[in-house]
Image (spheres, rainbow, N blue to C red):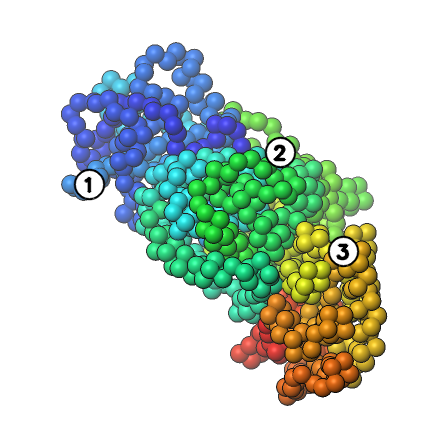
């Protein structure tokens, strides 16, 4: 963002004359004083109360004065400087006005404040509102914001209020006040919309020491930073948090701390959290709890943490104190726009950087501390020696023990934001498909009857799938939106490279495409819309006159379908994108621009969510780790832990060989089923020799099976008995302490008991056998056998499209998404995914 982009605060102290206004309408605004007085603008803003811009009682008739940070009370501006003020601010990110409103009656304070922002285009304004919506869904506090269009009645109310304020400024001989009112009127004349925001009292976060001490306040700040980081990851906003690992330069002014944050804003945030949480399917909530619990167990039970019980005991009291302190100040994110299409080069770098950063924040406390140190400007966390982190002297004022609690809160909030993200990921995919479907219909309408042959079209689809390279050069404009067709970026951009993908299938098209009305457009021309350049077609459509009554009727019908299929869907999900709030003349532009922005948002969400299917392996002894398939695919975590060798016991499982990294680790692969009658004792000696070899060369080894529960636990126990002289009970107690989900099946337990008797002459423990339960397929409700393997085999054969045979926690979410996207429904009170989770709950208990 430019250096002069919108910020609600400034260190400068602009002095302005107080400008009061009398309403020409029915209401009369009391004058603040009979004479103008010289006071600071920032003092007035600081004394003003928060204005609820969404209240039904909000009225522009109470507007008393307008202010602009570009102007002071000095009257020594040249005419040329005055004429350039608006142009400068437009070209540097937008025109920002501070609006002061008089309070009715004798209520103190007697003024309230709001912010009016004009961006360089209508789409930029709507994109900023869209960014605020994503912040709301992730639990990040932002100012209240809404888009006002020039076609609305409120636009005329703003114009009248500004004219009234200018009249009073003229009568008071206030040239600065008159000029600012004139600038607002000029912006209203030239623009198609504006963004109205509540004013936030406060200061830049990094400049306020109360956010970082005591530790309760530091925990609140760290928690907020965890959510803000997730927000900026999916928006690809590098203009807030500095982070060298992500290549972000940062801008501290875009993250504020406010101790006067309006209760109305806090209430709305609480409502948004409830909405987000309620939109998450129960199976998703249970799944994420399970996955994160696994990582937590692997971390909490590591040797370094076992030796610090006081730190763990302190976490509960710290959290309770932080919750009570949370009402005293708030971290507020501003300038949260959604870029149209990030540069291709940066998107490539994101695919390189995101997985490492996300994975290590989830799995490594030290790395999280390093990241927190960077994004907090050295106020929290501890600098480390990880590549890319500067180990300068820390200015953190809290102890190492308190820092542990702070980092814990940061990671917890990051995980919570990840759960929220995965909760609405499916909704965004559905919205994208609906937009894709209606835009295909619109293309068919405007190209029907065209004389140009499909063979002459460039066989390139503009319905881009996430991950495609493209660019959209937009010419600069002096003022916002002089004409209708100049407003939308779709009329200024051309697609350079695209991907046809597989969006022609019935599964990828919105339900609209299967409705009777739209079937006539898709019948016999499934490839038609995909072979058109959306940008060029829409531009030609807007340039040509609309005289065909049949075409106008079809476009009117299309608008109605857009309302019923897309806009209503957003309303039902409580999703306010900022688009579609204007008149119907430009709905297709709004639909296309929203779809373009959703493309790269969904791309990064998928990247983050895929990376989050990870876990930290549990350390058994110095060089020996245990885990499941998720741990084995956590490449960056394994490298960070110094693991050099991997012993895989499930190489026969589908997808396991494809997820290995032979260039980074040395593998020893075994194929043995997790069945009671499998002869795992044949592997005891060979596996122990391999682990001994790793220890001899100074390496570290991960022993893993699919779930990290039965086969891997059996091999680790046998190694401890064969090479370390442990009895079975001693080895079992050690393993359960560091890896609580360890549970060999009954057949493997018998093999371990036999080994214990062979080595020590007697059995050191009694083994409690589990009562077998019949496995039921969650999709077709058939009994498939007693073992997990039988369920996996059934899924492979009968439901191959939905599952690759994997039923561990990493695959449940994928199965759930597939079921929902394919609209599979078998009735009953539980969804198929919930049934799947219930059927396998005992297989995933920790």
Q: Is residue 44 visible?
A: yes
Please name the residue shown 58% across and 50% down the image: 366
The foreground one among 99 and 228 is: 228
C-alpha distance separating marks 3 and 1 = 70 Å
Q: Which residue is mark 1?
A: 108
Q: Quadrant of residue 383?
A: top right
Label annotation for residue 492: 2
- Image location (x, y in percent) of residue 3: 50, 28
Quarter of the figure with residue 60: top left
User: Dot 2 surroundings within 10 Å: few (below 14), some, or many (20 or more)?
Assistant: some
Disc 2 or 3, which lies upstream in sequence? 2
The C terminus, quarter of image:
bottom right
Residue 357 position within the rendered picture, expressed as x and y whole percent measured from the top left: 62, 48
For label 3, the SS is loop
Q: Percent x, y for residue 753?
A: 72, 83
What residue is shown at x 27% (from left), y 19% (from top)? Answer: 174
What's the residue at 79%, 81% (across, down)?
A: 678
């Amino acid at each position: 963002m430019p250096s002069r982009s919108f910020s609600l605060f400034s260190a400068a102290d602009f002095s302005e004359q107080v400008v009061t206004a009398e309403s020409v309408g029915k209401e009369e605004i009391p004058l603040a004083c009979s004479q103008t007085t010289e006071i600071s603008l920032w003092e007035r803003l600081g004394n003003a109360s928060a204005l609820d811009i969404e209240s039904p009682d909000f009225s522009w008739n109470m507007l008393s004065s307008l202010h602009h940070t570009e102007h002071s009370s000095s009257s020594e501006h040249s005419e040329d400087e005055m004429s350039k003020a608006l142009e400068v601010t437009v070209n540097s990110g937008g025109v920002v006005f501070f609006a002061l409103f008089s309070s009715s009656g004798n209520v103190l304070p007697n003024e309230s404040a709001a912010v009016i922002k004009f961006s360089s285009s209508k789409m930029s304004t709507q994109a900023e509102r869209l960014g605020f919506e994503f912040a709301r869904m992730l639990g990040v506090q932002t100012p209240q914001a809404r888009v006002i269009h020039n076609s609305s009645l409120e636009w005329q109310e703003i114009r009248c209020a500004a004219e009234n304020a200018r009249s009073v400024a003229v009568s008071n001989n206030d040239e600065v006040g008159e000029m600012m009112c004139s600038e607002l009127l000029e912006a209203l004349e030239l623009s198609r919309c504006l963004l109205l925001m509540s004013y936030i009292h406060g200061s830049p976060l990094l400049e306020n020491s109360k956010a970082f001490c005591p530790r309760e306040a530091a925990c609140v700040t760290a928690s907020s930073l965890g959510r803000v980081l997730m927000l900026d990851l999916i928006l690809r906003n590098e203009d807030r948090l500095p982070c060298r690992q992500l290549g972000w330069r940062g801008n501290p002014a875009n993250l504020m701390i406010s101790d006067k944050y309006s209760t109305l804003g806090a209430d709305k945030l609480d409502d948004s959290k409830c909405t987000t949480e309620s939109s998450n399917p129960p199976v998703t909530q249970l799944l994420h709890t399970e996955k994160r619990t696994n990582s937590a167990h692997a971390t909490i039970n590591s040797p370094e943490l076992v030796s610090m019980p006081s730190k763990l005991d302190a976490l509960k009291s710290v959290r309770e104190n932080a919750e009570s302190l949370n009402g005293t100040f708030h971290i507020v994110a501003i300038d949260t726009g959604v870029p149209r299409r990030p540069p291709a080069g940066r998107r490539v770098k994101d695919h390189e950087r995101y997985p490492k950063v996300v994975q290590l924040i989830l799995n490594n406390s030290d790395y999280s501390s390093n990241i927190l140190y960077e994004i907090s400007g050295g106020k929290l966390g501890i600098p480390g020696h990880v590549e890319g982190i500067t180990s300068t002297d820390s200015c953190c004022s809290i102890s190492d023990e308190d820092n542990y609690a702070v980092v814990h809160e940061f990671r917890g909030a990051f995980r919570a934001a990840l759960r929220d993200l995965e909760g609405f990921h499916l909704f965004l995919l559905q919205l994208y498909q609906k937009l894709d479907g209606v835009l295909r219909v619109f293309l068919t309408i405007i190209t029907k009857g065209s004389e140009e042959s499909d063979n002459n079209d460039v066989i390139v689809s503009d319905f881009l799938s996430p991950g495609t390279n493209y660019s959209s050069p937009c010419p600069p404009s002096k003022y916002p939106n002089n004409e209708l067709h100049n407003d939308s970026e779709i009329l200024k951009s051309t697609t350079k490279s695209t991907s046809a993908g597989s969006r022609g299938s019935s599964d990828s098209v919105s339900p609209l495409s299967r409705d009777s009305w739209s079937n006539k457009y898709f019948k016999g021309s499934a490839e038609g819309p995909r072979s058109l350049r959306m940008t060029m077609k829409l531009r030609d459509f807007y340039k040509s006159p609309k005289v065909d009554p049949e075409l106008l009727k079809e476009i009117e019908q299309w608008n109605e379908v857009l309302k019923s299929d897309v806009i209503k869907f957003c309303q039902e999900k409580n999703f306010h994108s900022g688009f579609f709030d204007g008149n119907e003349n430009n709905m297709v532009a709004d639909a296309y621009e929203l779809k373009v922005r959703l493309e790269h948002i969904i791309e990064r969400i998928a990247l983050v969510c895929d990376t989050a299917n990870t876990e930290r392996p549990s350390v058994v002894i110095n060089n020996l780790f245990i885990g499941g398939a998720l741990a084995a695919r956590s490449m960056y975590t394994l490298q960070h832990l110094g693991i050099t060798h991997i012993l895989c016991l499930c190489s026969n499982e589908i997808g396991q060989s494809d997820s290995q990294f032979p260039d980074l680790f040395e593998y020893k692969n075994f194929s043995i089923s997790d069945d009671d009658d499998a002869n795992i004792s044949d592997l005891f000696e060979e596996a122990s020799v391999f682990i001994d070899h790793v220890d001899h060369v100074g390496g570290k080894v991960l022993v893993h099976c699919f779930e990290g529960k039965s086969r891997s636990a059996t091999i680790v126990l046998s190694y401890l008995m064969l090479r370390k002289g442990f009895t079975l009970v001693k080895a079992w107690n050690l393993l359960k302490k560091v890896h609580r989900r360890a549970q060999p099946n009954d057949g493997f337990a018998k093999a371990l008991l036999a080994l214990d008797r062979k080595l020590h002459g007697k059995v050191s423990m009694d083994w409690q056998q589990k009562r077998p339960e019949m496995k039921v397929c969650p999709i077709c409700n058939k009994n498939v056998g007693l073992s997990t393997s039988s369920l996996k085999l059934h899924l492979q054969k009968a439901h191959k499209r939905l599952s690759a045979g994997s039923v561990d926690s990493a695959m449940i979410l994928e199965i759930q998404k597939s079921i929902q996207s394919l609209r599979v429904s078998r009735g009953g009170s539980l969804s198929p995914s919930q049934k799947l989770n219930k059927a396998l709950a005992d297989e995933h208990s920790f």
